[in-house]
């Protein structure tokens, strides 16, 4: 089979700056040399992707999946190695990337379509399909800065698939949409495959990766750990995650990046009465302690909740909740996410934190697995799965 993507010995290096609590811009304006370390986000990664197949990338947060995808999409240039891609690529990478916040959904469709190589007449012809697939008919003339993250993803995905690429690349965004939209996306992926197109997908939804991919690559700290049959690679990956249970516990221990103007300095997990024991069915609060080194308007804070095997459970943020947050240089405070009745079932969960601008495209501070907590058994006393629906069983009929 023709290989449409070949990655050979790909390595990518980033610089990490050590001006704690200061943005790079401030450091530069003061004429001070910013201190930095270099580290390799990808090291010597090689694989081939045959035409018409679906290829998945799995790995912990920070393992280099997004960096790899950006290299394949030619948004980043590798420092070593080679990448050869044959065909027209359409990529849905970061949430909100490529959208202009002040412009309406309509204008952004045209902007994005033209970036992806379509003429105006071609976009005109597809416009209704794009908006219809995204289900955004009513909001298409609203500036996208007022969109929820789900709306962003729907529009971004819809544009990406409607430009009819040979190769579609999708990074970790499907978890954001609702069930209905996810189902539509899966159908689209299937159509794409049937049409002989190639898909490269990053996802924490390991069950979906097992089902939809022809091959899966597992990245671990920037290195290719395995590549092969989906169930084998995914099982090995899950297996290895269990072993790490106690080693990556602490705040600041996880992977962190962002420009630093607003940061989350700590995460508190509080159960009923402010105790640290958390139980199913009881009140629950996640408290993010933040500090700011610059005036920033319209900051969005949020969390990602994952099981320890990497399954994304939920990702609430202040923007989707309609909360507006402006911060001043030198200020600090906390935001609470309060839950009256916790529907998570007993197990161990990781909290990632994120602070971003209103478009969610720019990260001020992102920390993978900033905290970890255990949920103890409570009421309802269900055992299977991740959440309780809080449902009641009733029986009718002769007994
Ligand atoms: N632009 C960047 N500058 C510096 N470090 C980065 C940049 N982008 C990603 N990183 C770092 O590179 C590593 C790999 O990140 P990423 O590819 O986003 O991982 P993943 O998508 O698997 O979570 C992480 O340590 C991340 O913090
Ligand atoms: Mg990523």
Image (cartoon, grey):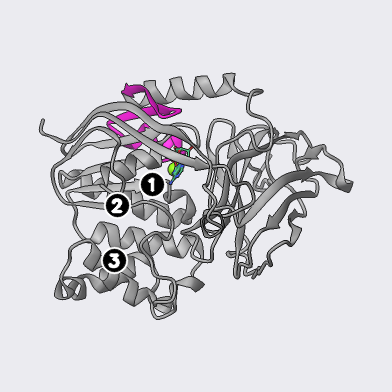
For marks 3 and 1 on the same chain, the one whose residue lies earlier in the sequence: 3
Cα gap from disc 2 to disc 3, whole angstroms: 11 Å
Q: Return the mark for residue 112.
A: 3
**Reading the chain from its start, which is encountered first: label 2 or label 3?**
2
Tell me what residue is drawn at x 26 percent, y 57 percent.
161
Q: Along the horizontal axis of the image, is 233 left or right of 47?
A: right
Residue 390 in sight in this render: no
Image disc number at residue 171: 1
Marker disc for residue 344 = none
Residue at image position (31%, 50%) is: 187
Establish if 48 lies above or below 318.
above
Ligand 2 neighbours mark 3 (CB distance < 8 Å): no
Query: Badge 1: how crowded within 10 Å, few (<14), some, or many (20+)?
Result: many
* Residue stretch rendered in magenta on the structure: 203-228
Residue located 70% across and 56% down the image: 291
The span from disc 1 to disc 2 (Cα, nearest Å) is 8 Å
The secondary structure type at the circle numbered 2 is: strand
Q: Are marks 1 and 2 in contact (CB under 8 Å)?
A: yes
The tag on residue 91 is 2
The kind of secondary structure element at disc 1 is strand
């Amino acid at each position: 089979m023709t290989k449409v993507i070949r990655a050979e010995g790909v390595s990518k290096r980033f610089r990490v700056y050590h001006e704690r609590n200061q943005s790079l811009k401030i450091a530069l304006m003061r004429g001070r040399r910013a201190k930095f370390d270099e580290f390799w986000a990808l090291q010597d990664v090689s694989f081939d992707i045959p035409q018409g197949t679906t290829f998945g990338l799995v790995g912990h947060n920070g393992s280099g999946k997004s960096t790899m995808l950006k290299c394949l999409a030619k948004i980043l240039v590798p420092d070593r190695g080679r990448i050869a891609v044959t065909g027209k690529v359409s990529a849905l990478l970061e949430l909100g990337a490529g959208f202009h916040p002040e412009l309406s959904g309509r204008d952004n469709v045209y902007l994005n379509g033209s970036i992806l190589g379509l003429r105006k007449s071609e976009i005109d012809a597809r416009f209704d399909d794009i908006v219809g697939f995204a289900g955004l008919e009513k909001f298409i003339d609203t500036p996208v800065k007022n969109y929820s993250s789900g709306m962003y993803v729907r529009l971004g995905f819809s544009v990406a698939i409607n430009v009819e690429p040979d190769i579609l690349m999708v990074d970790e965004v499907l978890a954001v949409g609702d069930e209905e939209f996810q189902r539509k996306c899966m159908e689209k992926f299937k159509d794409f495959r049937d049409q002989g197109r190639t898909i490269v997908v990053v996802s924490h939804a390991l069950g979906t990766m097992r089902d939809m991919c022809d091959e899966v690559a597992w990245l671990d700290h920037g290195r290719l750990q395995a590549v092969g049959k989906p169930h084998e690679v995914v099982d090995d990956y899950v297996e290895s995650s269990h072993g790490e249970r106690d080693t990556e516990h602490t705040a600041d221990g996880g992977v962190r990046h962002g420009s630093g103007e607003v940061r989350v300095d700590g995460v508190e997990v509080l159960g009923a009465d402010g105790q640290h024991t958390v139980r199913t069915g009881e009140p629950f609060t996640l408290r993010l302690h933040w500090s700011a080194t610059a005036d920033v308007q319209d900051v969005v804070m949020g969390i990602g909740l994952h099981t320890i095997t990497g399954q994304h459970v939920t990702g609430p943020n202040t923007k989707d909740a309609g909360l507006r947050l402006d911060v001043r240089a030198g200020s600090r405070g906390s935001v609470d996410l309060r839950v009256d009745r916790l529907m998570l079932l007993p197990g161990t969960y990781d909290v990632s934190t994120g602070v971003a601008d209103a478009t969610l495209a720019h990260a001020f501070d992102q920390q993978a697995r900033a905290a970890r907590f255990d949920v103890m058994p409570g009421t309802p006393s269900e055992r299977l799965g991740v959440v309780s629906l809080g449902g009641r069983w009733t029986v009718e009929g002769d007994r």
